[in-house]
Amino acid sequence: MLAAGAILWRQQPDAPSGRVELGLVHRPRYDDWSLPKGKLDAGESLLVCAVREVFEETAHRVTLGRPLPPQHYTVAGRPKTVRYWLAEADPHAAERLPDHEVDEVVFLPAGEAVRRLTYERDAELVRTALRGPLHTTPLVLLRHAKAVSRAAWSGPDVERPLSPEGISDLDPLGEALATLRPRRVLSSDSVRCAETVRAFARKQGLVVELEPHLSEESLRVPDDRHPAEAIIRSLLRDGPAVLCSHRPVLPLLFDAAGADPDGGLEPGGFAVLHHEHGHVVAIERHRPRGAGPAPVIDL
């Protein structure tokens, strides 16, 4: 059984910087205090599930931040895995009305929240979360979705489009990327990359920034320092962004960010590099729809 949720946090009102409150929910069915979470719907990604469950249980619309270690335990004799992220509280959230699932949502100072939590596994997760930065910025490195094979394409490679399978993956990919609320979308100028992010960018009200230095063709130009390295360094000083490129280019991009490619990405797969002041503090990797969840890797 898979589930997902978040540690909801906010700065304490009228408190010195660094003082935080955490959001807990009370479930009348179990008479317990826990972190907002819930089971995946059919075909749903972990990222989308976490955002949906936090909203359903707390009325907060959140952007996911740094990933946290998964929890593994048994419920009614069945193994259960819960994946968590940090998520800053929505200052405009309406009060959630009590119902049979959650009858109370409270924000408590971190120390008090740890003591209030019913389960030690939740308390330990909070203590782990508080040992790292609460606010981070995501940089997504995305490999384009599955394209028409080179053997089946007679035109220039830069014009090779997505396959029907790749196109079918775009909607769930866009839903997952939206949980990170990027403010920029960059792409190789190859058709298969631009097609991978175009619909998502349009839905988010963003323009796809086509960048020839992210293409496979750019690797054929000898250069001591590939221009894509400067793009990565610039993005690590900027806000949330998605960057779509190719399998041969991705190791260079990971290296420029000071991160381990760890075997690369499948077509349509992506890695989220969570950084603080330009320093990558955590990486999570997500496989394409139907390939199952990939592990979170904390640096």
Image (cartoon, rainbow, N blue to C red):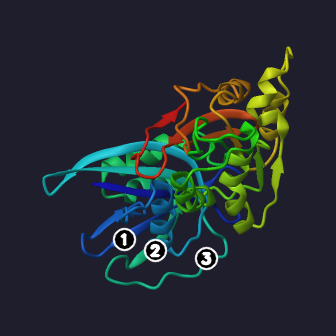
For label 2, the residue is 56
The reply, left or right, for residue 245 in relation to residue 288 is right
Identify residue type, mark 2: Glu
The reply, left or right, for residue 161 in relation to residue 31 is right
Query: Toward the viewer: 277 or 195?
Result: 195
Q: Residue at x 72, y 65 (%)?
A: 204
Query: Toward the viewer: 132 or 45?
Result: 45
For label 3, the residue is 93
The residues bearing labels 3 and 1 have C-alpha atoms spaced at a distance of 18 Å
Q: Secondary structure at mark 2?
A: helix
Of tags 3 and 1, which is closer to the observer? 3
Identify residue type, mark 1: His
Q: Quadrant of residue 25?
A: bottom left
Q: Secondary structure at mark 1?
A: strand
The reply, left or right, for residue 257 in relation to residue 228 is left
> For the residue carrying disc 2, how many other residues have a C-alpha within 10 Å: few (<14), some (14-19), or many (20+)?
some
Q: Residue furthest left?
A: 77
Can residue 195 be seen? yes
Q: Residue at x 51, y 53 (%)?
A: 165
Can residue 21 be seen? no
Image spot of residue 111 (x, y percent): 48, 52
Q: Secondary structure at mark 3?
A: loop
For label 1, the residue is 26
Identify residue type, mark 3: Ala
> For the residue carrying disc 1, how many other residues have a C-alpha within 10 Å: few (<14), some (14-19), or many (20+)?
many
